[in-house]
Every structure is written in C-alpha cells, then in structure tokens.
Image: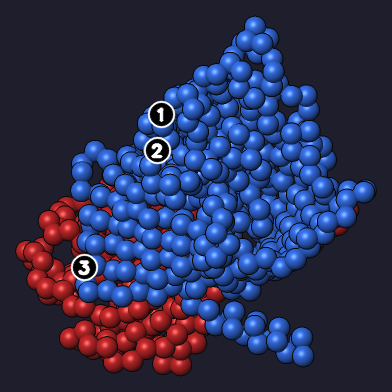
Chain colours: A red, B blue
C-alpha cells in the first residue's frame, strides 16, 4: 500500500510539472490599497483616475496610484464589476443582479437596471466592460457556467454566449480591440477575439485571488488582488509578446 | 450496457451547473443540493461473519435553500432526506443540517440564531463535499462533542478577515436539540468560543488546495467549550444525546479544548488538530469513572486525541490524493487507545460538483471500549452537487 501511495504521489507531481502553456508575467510594482476586499478596477474616461469596487459594496475613486479620493455613500450589496464612460460609472452588483449607475462628476447614485440571471448567488455578475467600437457592454458571470452577455448602450440584453474554459472569470476589460478576461482560479489572463470568440493568447500571473484588471494610460496593466488588498503593476503584455 | 450507462452519467456530470437562484433585485434565494452514494466493503476480523455493512449506501440527498436580503439578513435551511428517511440523528450527517438566520446590521458583531454547525473544530466546519474522504476522522463524527446545536452565535472578523472571533451559547444537547425541543432537566446551556488567525489572507474552510495558491497560507484556530449540566435525581438525557460512549453530554462539568492548524501551497495541503475533553461527573459513581474511587480518578476522566492529514491535488489530472492518521482515546481510565490510518483518492469530473471518491481505512489499534468487527474498510462512490 505504501508503494502504491508513493508512486501515485510521484505521478501526480510529475504530470503537474508539465503544465506550462501560458506565458508567465512578472509584476514590476505592487501597492497596498485602502479599499477593503477590492473586486474590480476600471480606468476613468479622462484616464486620470481609477474606480475600484469592493465585496462589501463600496465604489471608490482613486488616483492612478490607488490613493482614495472619494467614496460613494449608497451601499451596494456585492459590487464585483466596474466600468466608466464620460457620464456614468457602471457597477455590476453580483447578488442582486443589478447594474447601478453613478454620475461621474457628482459621484451620486443615478439608477439601477435589473438583469435577471438564475445562476448561483455567488456565481453571478463578476465583470463588466464596454467595447466602444461596437457600442456593446459585456456583462460576464463568474462560473457554472460563464456566460458572456452582450448588452446595448441602454443595458438591454442582446445576446449571450458561454465561455468554455476551466476555472472562472473574475474581471474583464476591453483593450485594443480585444476582450481581456481574468481567470481567478487558474490565475490566468485570457485575450479573446470577440468576433470569432476564440482565445488568442493567455498569460499566467502569480497573484493570489486576482479580481480586477485594467490598463493605465502608459500601457501598464494593473491587477487587483481581493484577498490581499493589493494592486500589482505589470509591463504591457503586448509589448512583451512583440519583443519575443 | 454498463459502459453506456457510465458514459451517459459522465456526460450528465460534465453538464452540471451548480445552484439556481431567484431574485427580486434585493432579496436573492438560492437552491442547491448534493446527492452521493458509495459502496462500502469491510474486511472482517477472524471469526466475524456478519457482512451487512457490505452494501451501497445513500449518504447524501441534501437540499439547501439559502438567501440574502439586502446587506442585513442571511439565512439557510438545509435538509438531508437520506437521513430523514432512515429516521436517524447521525451526528455526522443529520437529517436537519441547518436552519438559521444571520443579522449583519450591528456595528460590533454579526448575530446568528437557529440550528446549525457550532464553531468548534476546523475539521468539523469543513463542508463534507469539499473533502476527498467519505468519512470524517472519528473525533469529529459527533460522538465526543456535538457538531450542531440550537443557539446564538456572535461573530466578528478583523484585519480583512484574517482574524475571526466567535462566541456562542447553545442548548447543549447537540444534534438532538432540534428533535427534542426541550433542554434536559438541568436547564443548563453549553458555551463555545473560537478564535482563528489566518495568514497572509483569509483561509476558507477547505481541505484541498485545488487553486494551487501561489504563496503559503496557514490558518490557526483555538477553541473551547464548557457545559455544567447536573441532572436532578431520577432524570435522564434524551435518547441519543450522550453519544455512543456516553461522554458527548454528561451530568456534571464538561470542558473541551482544542486547536487546529491548516496550511496549503501549490496544491499541497495539511491539517492537524488536537482536542482534549475533561469530564467531571456530578455523580462520583458514574460509569464514566469506571469504578475508580474519587481518590484514584480525582473525580474526572480525560478523553480526546489528534489527527493529521496531508493531501496533494493535481490540476492536470483533476485528482486529489490524501493520507490521514488519527489517534484518540475514549477514556484515560481505560487502558489502551485507538489508531487509524486512511487514504483517499478523489477524481474531479467537474470540480467538486461531480467527484468520484475512494477511501481506505485501516484500524491499527483499538481500545476495548470501541472494539469493532472489522479492521479494513473500503469505500468508493460518487458525489454530485447541483
């Protein structure tokens, strides 16, 4: 029995070591955030600020270094996704299936839009982003299954398709014509071509519980860790790919 | 034919989407459940002939309804129809598993009221479906201390949930409390406290590191429980309350202390837990003092033990392997103790939602108070969560 046990363990570890199909990224800097349990991050329309949402229902505006400038007074339930245009900040509230809108200038709550979804309570809307060229919002469920729901500018559901990937989707952002998806459980970034729904690239990051992704004006990629309350800065992965 | 059935079952399992919910924009209610069945085989000791335990067993037929109303209220009702059908109050796997609500509107702590798991022992708190095994270690199967009860629990977490403090008061009859309704004739309650520290982040109640966390994580818990139930002459505890060895609830003072440690990193995980029970029966002629005089026993008995478990989860193979060693003593007033070694293998078809598990247990040593008919046990089965 001991021999069987030992051999099984060796086989498991050997097979595990062979897994290396994603390009590994190394962060260049990391900072501690003052927003508890940060669950997503988005760049403001004027590219001067960040919006960070948290599991305990807070929307905060920060500078590009994560210093908090202001917070909303309205309590959200379980804010998991955020996107901002020149007029509104859109927050995806996972449990109540809401997208709540806040005025960019006043930071006041404007309204909420209810998007029905019958999946698990904590497997609901984790990500929200926008494709400016197609005028399409992407609202994404976490897992079991992962649905990528396309909404028009007025937040009406237009269509949806499922993502056939292991793990989950904890955040998304639209960058240079591609949908960048963050996979928390696998600690991977998937780059999707939304026209053919294919994953074109994937990157591995060594960040625990990554829940937010965005790109800064200088091209740096930022990843927010929920459990560790940290924000990681990465060199632009596209440059890395081009260099290789 | 068999292979066709298996393929159909595999396809069904692949398509599982756990949990469904209904929602009105503020109040969300979720329905989920677990069904599991295993085959059990026992290797009997020489001279033993009863093979009634070589059988299929429906372990779980659970349905759970849980909800959240805004930011203030959470609740859960969970039933296991497999145990309800059998009419048993198996403390490891009772028919009524949860019936509680939590109020989160107070500044200093959250309040939970109702029937559910008491916050004692990390191993007891790990949901069974997230384990590679078909059976918990003996200490945590509800014969030495209760795993569930009716009562009030106050909890508060700090420092990004790295520290959690929990205190509660309960009827003190364990899983039987829900069935009986009344307390025993002493009317006394049981009090439980637990403190947990995690590093570097919040550590969920899980045995396996399926996420392959990139930095080492640990969770350290210390907990204690106290009851002083002195039955009036001529009264008894409700049937089933005292457990198989008569020490789960005693007439007298019972103090229980324990600590637990869990760690995980890159697929490896380990757990260790140690518990000691000190029972001081009110009646010095209690059978728990095993006919020793007060001078000899000092009026109390000790019970408890420890267990250690190590696991590795391969994401590539979607398989976990785990080994466990446990050593425990029912009473220090009786010579001998118990030692067991177990091994488990779990293959995830669709994560924990569909998992085939196998467990082998070998009794290395046993004391006379719990002499069993078998010395090897093998279980293999399938759990599906929806």
Bin the neighbour count of mark 1 within 10 Å (Cα to Cα): few under 14, some 14-19, many 20 and up. Answer: some
Bin the neighbour count of mark 3 within 10 Å (Cα to Cα): few under 14, some 14-19, many 20 and up. Answer: some
Q: On the image, which quarter does residue B312 sit in?
A: bottom right
Q: On the image, which quarter does residue B142 sit in?
A: top right
The residue wearing badge 2 is: B183
Q: Given this view, does label 1 or label 3 mark the residue nearer the observer?
A: 1
The spot of residue B253 in percent (x, y) is 49, 22
User: Is B206 or A169 nearer to us in this picture?
Assistant: B206
Q: State the SS at label 2.
A: loop
**Protein chain holding label 1:** B
Q: State the SS at label 1.
A: loop
Q: Earlier in the sequence, mark 1 or mark 3?
A: 3
Residue farthest to the top, as pictured: B295
* Marking on residue B26: 3
Q: State the SS at label 3.
A: loop
The residue wearing badge 1 is: B186
Q: Given this view, does label 2 or label 3 mark the residue nearer the observer?
A: 2
The spot of residue B262 in percent (x, y) is 57, 42
User: Is A4 or B259 nearer to us in this picture?
Assistant: B259
Counting labels gives 3
Residue A175 in view: no
Asked if disc 2 and disc 1 are in contact, CB closer than 8 Å, the reply is: yes
On screen, residue B221 versus residue B313, left or right, reads left
The spot of residue A190 in percent (x, y) is 48, 75
């Amino acid at each position: 029995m001991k021999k069987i046990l030992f051999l099984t363990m060796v086989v498991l570890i050997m097979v595990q070591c062979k897994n290396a199909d994603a390009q590994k990224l190394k962060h260049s800097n990391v900072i501690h955030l003052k927003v508890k349990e940060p669950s997503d991050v988005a760049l403001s329309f004027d590219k001067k600020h960040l919006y960070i949402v948290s599991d305990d229902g807070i929307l905060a505006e920060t500078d590009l270094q994560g210093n908090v400038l202001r917070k909303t007074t309205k309590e959200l339930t379980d804010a998991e996704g955020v996107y901002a245009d020149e007029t509104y900040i859109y927050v995806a509230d996972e449990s109540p299936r809401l997208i709540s809108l806040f005025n960019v200038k006043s930071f006041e709550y404007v309204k909420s839009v209810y998007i029905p979804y019958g999946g698990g309570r904590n497997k609901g809307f984790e990500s929200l982003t926008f494709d400016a060229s197609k005028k399409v919002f992407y609202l994404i469920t976490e897992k079991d299954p992962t649905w990528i729901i396309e909404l028009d500018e007025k937040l009406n559901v237009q269509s949806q398709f499922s993502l056939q990937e292991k793990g989950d989707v904890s955040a998304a952002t639209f960058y240079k014509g591609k949908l960048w998806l963050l996979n928390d459980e696998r600690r991977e970034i998937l780059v999707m071509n939304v026209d053919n729904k294919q994953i074109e690239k994937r990157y591995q990051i060594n960040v625990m519980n990554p829940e937010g992704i965005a790109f800064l004006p200088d091209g740096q990629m930022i990843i927010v860790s929920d459990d560790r309350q940290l924000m990681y800065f990465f060199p632009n992965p596209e440059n890395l790919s081009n260099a290789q | 034919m068999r292979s066709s059935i298996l393929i159909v079952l595999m396809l069904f399992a692949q398509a599982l989407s756990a949990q469904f919910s209904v929602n009105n924009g503020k109040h969300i209610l979720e329905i989920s459940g677990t069904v599991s069945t295993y085959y059990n085989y026992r290797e009997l000791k020489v001279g033993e002939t009863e093979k009634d335990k070589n059988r299929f067993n429906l372990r779980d037929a659970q349905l759970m309804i849980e909800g959240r109303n805004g930011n203030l209220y959470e609740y859960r009702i969970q039933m296991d129809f497999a145990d309800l059908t059998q009419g048993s109050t198996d403390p490891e796997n009772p028919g009524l598993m949860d019936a509680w609500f939590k109020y989160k509107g107070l500044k200093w702590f959250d309040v939970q009221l109702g029937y559910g798991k008491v916050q004692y022992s990390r191993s007891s708190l790990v949901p069974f479906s997230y384990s590679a095994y078909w059976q918990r270690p003996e200490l945590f199967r509800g014969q030495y201390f209760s795993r569930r009860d009716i009562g009030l629990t106050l909890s508060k977490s700090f420092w990004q949930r790295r520290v959690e403090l929990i205190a509660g008061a309960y009827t003190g009859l364990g899983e039987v409390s829900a069935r009986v309704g009344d307390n025993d004739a002493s009317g006394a309650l049981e009090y439980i406290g637990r403190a947990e520290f995690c590093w570097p982040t919040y550590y969920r109640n899980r045995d396996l590191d399926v996420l392959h966390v990139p930095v080492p994580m640990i969770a350290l818990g210390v907990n204690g429980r106290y009851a002083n139930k002195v039955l009036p002459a001529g009264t008894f505890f409700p049937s089933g309350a005292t457990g198989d060895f008569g020490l789960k609830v005693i007439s007298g003072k019972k103090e229980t202390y324990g600590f637990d440690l869990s760690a995980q990193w890159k697929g490896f995980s380990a757990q260790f837990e140690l518990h000691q029970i000190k029972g001081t029966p009110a009646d010095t002629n209690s059978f728990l003092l095993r006919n020793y005089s007060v001078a000899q026993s000092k009026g109390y008995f000790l019970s408890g033990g420890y267990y250690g478990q190590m696991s590795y989860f391969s994401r590539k193979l979607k398989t976990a392997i785990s080994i466990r060693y446990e050593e425990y003593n029912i009473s220090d007033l009786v010579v001998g103790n118990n030692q067991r070694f177990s091994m488990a293998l779990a293959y995830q078809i669709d994560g924990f939602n569909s998992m085939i598990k196998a467990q082998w247990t070998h009794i290395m040593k046993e004391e006379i108070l719990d002499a069993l008919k078998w010395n090897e046990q093998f279980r293999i089965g399938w759990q599906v969560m929806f």
